[in-house]
Image: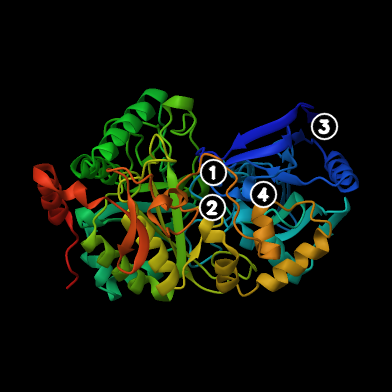
Amino acid sequence: MKQNRSSGFSYTSYQQGQTCNAARAPFTPTSLEELQEIVQNAARNNYTLKALGNRHSTTDMICTEGVPIHMDQINHFNYDVTTELARVGAGSTVYNFMEQLHKNGRTIYGLPSYGDVTVGGATGTSGHGSNLRGAATISDQIVSVIIVDGLGNIRNVTDPETIRAFRVHLGLLGIIYELTIKTVPQFKLHIRNYPVPDRILWSGGELTELIRSNEHFQFWWFPTAREVILSVGNSVPISTPGNCQTYLISESPAGTSLGFATAIETMQEGMDHLGMFLIQGFTKLSLYQQVIGKSPIFTEDGKTLCNTAVGFNHRMVSNRCNECAWNHGNASLLQQDYEIIVPLSELQGALHTLRSIMQEQPVEFPLTGIYFRFLSSSDALMSINSDQESVAIEWMLVPRADRYSDAILGLPSIQAFTQAVIEKHKGRTHWAKNGLYFTNPQLVREKYEHLPTFVRHMEEFDPQGIFLNDFGRRIRFDSETRIRDPRVKHCALLDHCICRNDLDCGDGSGSSYRCNLLQGYRVCRENPKTYEGVKGQVLRDFLNLIKPDQPT
């Protein structure tokens, strides 16, 4: 067991949007016994702990005022041929877990798009894929877990009702050491990505047929381009030729990342919607065509596009990057990630709400469009798809170079989208995404009917609060949201609050955003002077040009 004894330790989320300040550097246990000793010492000495994976959460659920525990050495694997169950260490990455299963001719459903998250982290936050026929999350395939509870006891949790709490544990029920997961025989997927006019979204029957009749279905909507990219796939025999894999999370060397980051920052500073529209067009093409400067969406050799594509399940729906856009220090292309999950029955209503807001204030989505994935119903108490077939609506934008003072281009529409879908369409926010406001106690109570049962499990497995942090206190005690980052001066810019006054959006200078209404929702809107003069007229004309059509 390793630990740097130095006092004070800071770390960030993978996109650098969340900064955490711990009491000291992390422990790095290599065994269950070492993990137990860490928890027992914390319980005796009354300090808190937080298990860390690869920090792929942009919320404060990854933070602790106590001591973090790096779980990367807890990465063991075992497959039982008789039971067809796999046991995996919580610190193993999803990618490595899948490759180990593949060697045994097995796989699982519900894989997240990015495979370099840990199994413990993915299950703790409702990491998901797109699947209405089988499990949509790794969590829903958990049979049992081995944990160290808040008193330092090793517990093997097998009771089906209790497992419902541990399937999405939020890091609040103990330190997860090992998960036992159901597997299925390995299979291949046949997937084709192709563009269609976005009128398919208003056709009702045609979209429903695609959603229901395919094992794999997801799509990206580009409202200002009036186009949708469909991804349609089904399983095929494992003997089918093809060894393609996805590069949805593309390789991005430092020079490429810096170039995109610099260009997008310049465009946001100058409110250059045309430039953002062109980058969005590049992204849209890359989802079904080969483009220069980006990995093919499906490829066998890393260079040549295969679309239609055939490959093994896990490699077709999940990947990792060696040169990730966000991992280049000052040369990184960072992303601000949003995701709202609504009941599938609310999809048409949510689409109309998004369209209505876009018609009033268009915005480009240069990184992913608006990404739609479909989730079967889950029995997990705190899953984003608990008790309902759901659709996850996700978008990524690029934060400003000074995210604490400057607004992302399109912020008013984004804030109105989020509030409207949550309020009008029974939306839940993803635990690992969006701003701190969206895990406030009132919203969590309103959206998760099983919360009281989950809190009882928190009290049982962590009676002393060893695993609590600000996030956990909001869940367990209805504590108010605490913004600990002293750099946050305008809380609404990062969705840590809904704006109440202009200072929540900016410093009141001529170019800063102001708190105002967009379709009845309080958002940070551009200063009206932005649209004055010749430049303002050009901007208005272009925005009118790219407004989505009214559905017919």
For image coordinates 32% across by 43% down, the residue present is 509
Left or right: residue 191 versus residue 428 is left
Residue on which the image places disc 3 = 1
The residue labelled by disc 4 is 120
Check the image and name the residue furthest to the top: 255
Please provide percent x and percent y for residue 316. Answer: 45, 47
Few, some or many C-alpha atoms within 10 Å of disc 2 (few <14, some 14-19, many ≥20)? Answer: many
Residue pictured at 71% horizontal, 44% vertical: 51
Q: CA distance from mark 1 to mark 2?
A: 8 Å
Residue type (three-letter) at the residue carrying disc 3: Met
Gap in angstroms between the C-alphas marked 4 and 2: 13 Å
Q: Give the CA distance from mark 1 to mark 4.
A: 12 Å
| Label 3 neighbour load within 10 Å: few <14, some 14-19, many 20+ | few
| Quadrant placement of the N terminus | top right
Residue designated by label 2? 111
Extreme residue toward the right, this view: 44
Q: In the rendered structure, which disc, 3 or 1, sits on the residue that comes first in sequence?
A: 3
Q: Residues at badges 1 and 2 in contact (C-beta under 8 Å)?
A: yes
Residue 395 is left or right of residue 377, and the answer is left
Question: Where 35 falls versus 426 (above or below)?
Answer: above
